[in-house]
Amino acid sequence: MKKLIRSTLATVILTGAGGILTLGVSGVASAAGTPPWQPEASSVGTILFFNASGQQITGGKLTDSPIAAYVEGTVAPRAGDTKATLLGYLPVNGQAPGSWSGDQLSSSTTYPNTSAPGALASATLPVVTGASGDESVAQLAANYPNTDTSSDGYAGIYELRLKTTGAGLGQTTTYDSVDIAISGTGASATWSVDYPTPTLNATSTVLTASPTSPQTAGTSVTLTATVSPSVSGTVQFENGGVALGAPVTVSGGTAQLSTSTLPVGTDSLSAVFTPATNLAYSGSTGTASYTINPAPAAGTTTALSVNPLSAAAYTSVGITANVTNTATSAALAAGAGTIKFYDDGTDSTGDVTSNSVLLGTQSLASGGSATLNYSTFAVGTHNLVAVFTPADLATYNTSTSSAVAFTATTPAVTPAVGSIDTSIPVGGLTISTPYSSANPFNLGAATLNSTATAFVASAAFGSPSNPSQGVTITDTRAGDLAWTATATVTDFSNGTGGVINGQNLTLTNVTPSYISGNALQAGSVSTSSVTNSSVYSATAAGSDGLRGSPHQFASASAGAGSVYIDGVLTLTSPTSTPPGLYVATLTLTVS
Amino acid sequence: MFHKNLKLGLATLLVAGAVPLVITGTANADYAPQPGDVVAVGGDTPQYAASFLADGDYNGDVGYNATATVNRLVTFNATADANGRSTYAKGSTTVQLNPTVVLRAGQKPVQRISSSGNAITALINDPNETTINFIFSSSLPTTAQQSSASGVGGLDVVEIGTDAVQIAVNSTTNAPAGLSPAELLGIYTGQITKWNQLPGDTSTDTIIPLLPPTSSAIYKSFYAALTTANGGTAPTLSGYTTVEQNDPTAITGATIPADAIVPFSQARLILFNDGYFQNPNNAFGTTQTPLTAGINLLTGTAPDSSASLNVGITDYAIYRANDQNSTTIFQPGGTRNFAQTLFYNPGGSTPYFASNAAKALITASGVTPNYQYLGAAHS
């Protein structure tokens, strides 16, 4: 039992040659299954439709004229007949098929038609040859609107019949028939075979590639899909399921795509054939595995030119190397590598040995060119060689130029060649404060805080108005070296057993003050406060605040000169602290 | 289930004697058209084109009725004889028998319409306009006929194809290779009676000029050519014998066939030469043999060095103009009346007479298809 869902139909309006052609085609989706009038007693076979290329189709546009280029009956209603005619009828519920109204859709055409394509030319079965101007399904529907809107199986359906005749013979009473459904509106309205359900013809697709695998990356590979039988459609070439370009129209049974971008590795190629709309053929896929090997580095050619080729010693000489891709002669791009210029003295072999003297190194500039201006050639012959070293050895190979001889002649006036030297002192890095045991920094008298939970003493350790009262760091070292400044403090002691834990001392508001004329300027120095998280007892262990491991409070990445580092030192002590003068040692270090 | 045989019964009686007669049988129709059928009558010249369009041709091309399962297209030939033979006694201007036909089921037999002119008249005079729906004709309605039909909106004309009128002679003839209109004017006005009156012809035989009925399209076309040859003045014809138009036996059955001439439809001779007509002496069920016309058409150069007569003739379908807009649908479930279905359907599907199928059928009748809607054309 066929499972058919007939289309919901609506009024179709088409613009005809002489005005508006209104197709009163209406209906509703009918129940799935065999049309209620089938099997039809007078129908001895079904009808197959073919396009002008002889490819079987299952439908078309409502306005197609002819409906199909060729229409073949699957059973000859009468042996010996030589002409076939296509007729169209409107099935009507309650009427026998023999009483339905309809139109003649084609002329009566002779078969076999030796001009027909493919197997149709020799078909012994009846074949109607359509012609432009034959009645379309749209016209049939306009002349006989299907107004059935019920689900009785008649809605939207027309029956096409193929009858045969022979010279001097009447028509047969039997015929081949097929039921078609129409759907859509306007110019896009279509017809399609509804009963019997069309059987799709199988296709096969074979995928080949040229040149044969494996190939190197960048090689142009032509993929060819051969579709059999040769039917219209498109082929989508894919690699690993990813489309390679747009679908390619099949022509003469083949579709081709050339690509030079297949990725390195084993590529899983496929050619997915999709038949053209309405063809009675199924799709198929051909596959092939293809290996792409990495492409070798491209060979390079380094050409060397010297200008002038002969000049007085110690004259400036332009030595230029030009590097090209050997295969394409294209100049390498800027930055593709560097050129080392050598002087091989009297060695004209063009090789570079341990005796070669490196004159200089230049990066490849635009146009694949690099130039070294050299002006200290001594008198004599200098065989100059340029060596190209690529930035990426996977892309380009190295290459060495041929030797170019430059002759340095004796200058009219021999230049006095002297030497000038100097030395840069190592320099030093110092950190200092104005304070010492003899001149201690005084935090002032401690006072109870507002909550009377601790004694607090605090004082500015230098200030913007008097920056030198803080820390002074001076860097005179050569080489623009970095430095880091740290601080650590001991516990405070009053000399009579009273102790204030050094973790209670903090350094905050750390600020650099730059000095004009130094390399160290705004932004050169980074600072950080050294804080604590509690008020520690005299005996509490730890390295919070400024006690313990040196605590960084300033740093610089480079720059010579002096800079002031100011801040605020604050000491907090428990209320249990015995009275007295407490002293601690603050050690500042820079390295 | 319909069983409709449109061929008319024909009783042929050959009476031996001094004056052999060929008498057509009564038009005892085997099929009388039903009320929904479209009925056509017409002239002899286009009758086969009309017949083929309705029922198909002898080559296997189906006609309109191949599809029509309910209401059919019925055409009645001008001649009661399917071979189109004469109803006139040989050598006589007397119609031996007026064949009759039943044009609609339930009606009584009436005289068969036998020419284009009579068909136009019949269409106009059809009581209640219910018997004849259209006619096939090789003549256009006259202005007067169009006026007479004003009650039905006038007459609409559709050209279906073209034919030619030429001079037919016996296959063995004393006639020259061609006869010009001027020479034929002399023959049919009695000024030229013998062949040797024509330049270069030595036969002393008397020419036997034949003509179809004056109402026939062949006659009208021929007479118009003679009028032209006469400087535009209608000539007075004399000395000729009236015969059925397009009937080769008018020539082959003449007293001396070699001396007989008659204007003839080129299309009709094509049908003969294609073997359509069978020898009526063979009974049904026995071996059938093609009926040879035994005549040729003159197409060579006339003795006066002019071209032989070759007058174009056009075949038409003519119907009442009011039917073009009739709300009576021809086929059940359809949207078109019979005029739109068959003749003219502006903005709609191609009418059958203009279809590819119709072209093949018209061609099979020997006529060159040339569909044109001509509206209220007249001569």
Image (cartoon, coloured by chain):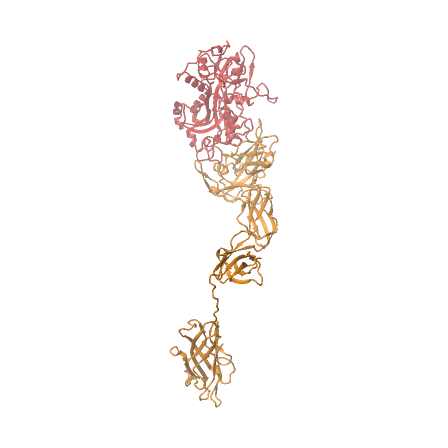
Chain colours: A orange, B red
Q: Position of residue A583 (x, y in %)?
A: 46, 86
Asked whether B165 or A154 is in front, the reply is B165
Q: Is residue A244 visible?
A: yes
Q: Is residue A453 visible?
A: no
Q: Position of residue B94 (x, y in %)?
A: 48, 14
B128 lies above or below A282: above
A246 lies above or below A138: below
| Residue positioned 53% across, 52% down in the render | A329
Quadrant location of the N terminus of chain A in the rendered image: top right
Q: Residue furthest top?
A: B204
Asked whether B160 or B114 is in front, the reply is B160
Q: Position of residue A119 (x, y in %)?
A: 60, 36
A56 lies above or below B48: below
| Residue positioned 48% across, 90% down in the render | A496
Q: Residue furthest front?
A: A412
Q: Residue furthest left?
A: A465
Could you tell me how many numbered marks the image carries? 0
Give left or right: position of A526 versus A354: left
Q: Position of residue B243 (x, y in %)?
A: 49, 16
Give left or right: position of B15 versus A459: right
